[in-house]
Image (cartoon, grey):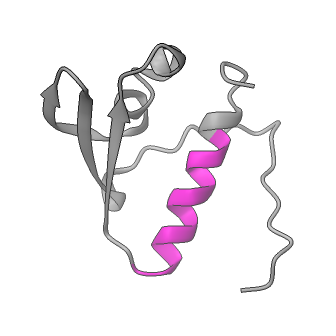
Amino acid sequence: IIGRNIEFAFIDYIVDYLSTKKIKTVKSSYIKTKKNELVKDFYDQCSFSPVGTNDAGKKYIMELGKYKPQQIKYIEVVNERKN
């Protein structure tokens, strides 16, 4: 499903959810593998800022207030679980 924008709809949903929980910062890592090569720039495309790079991959941070949603209108993430 990578490349069909589902990944962007999903990250929009996650950021929105975390914002409702008053979370302000998210840290993440890209770990370089042959299978992960397809998504090596994903965090760069999602308002994450790189904070470290080495041979194993990259570390990122994002301030949720600076997130720029992709707003993929033709995909809906539905959470049927009650919070």
- Dominant secondary structure of the magenta stretch? helix
Residue 38, horizontal then vertical, whole percent: 52, 15
* Residue 50 found in image quarter: top left
Q: Is residue 21 magenta?
A: yes
Residue at the image position 66 percent from the left and 18 percent from the top = 3
Say which quadrant the N terminus sits in.
top right
Residue at the image position 46 percent from the left and 71 percent from the top = 19
Q: Compared with residue 30, is residue 13 higher up or lower down, i.e. above or below? A: below
In the figure, is residue 60 to the left or right of 1?
left
Residue reaching furthest to the bottom: 83
Residue at the image position 38 percent from the left and 74 percent from the top = 23
Q: Compared with residue 11, is residue 5 higher up or lower down, i.e. above or below? A: above
* Residue 83 found in image quarter: bottom right
Q: Nearer the viewer, residue 28 or 17?
A: 28
Residue 72, horizontal then vertical, whole percent: 69, 37
In the figure, is residue 71 to the left or right of 4?
left
Q: Nearer the viewer, residue 55 or 11?
A: 55
In the figure, is residue 55 to the left or right of 77?
left
Magenta stretch bounds: 9-22
Residue at the image position 31 percent from the left and 70 percent from the top = 24
Q: Compared with residue 25, is residue 22 higher up or lower down, i.e. above or below? A: below
Q: Compared with residue 20, is residue 45 higher up or lower down, i.e. above or below? A: above
Q: Is residue 12 magenta?
A: yes
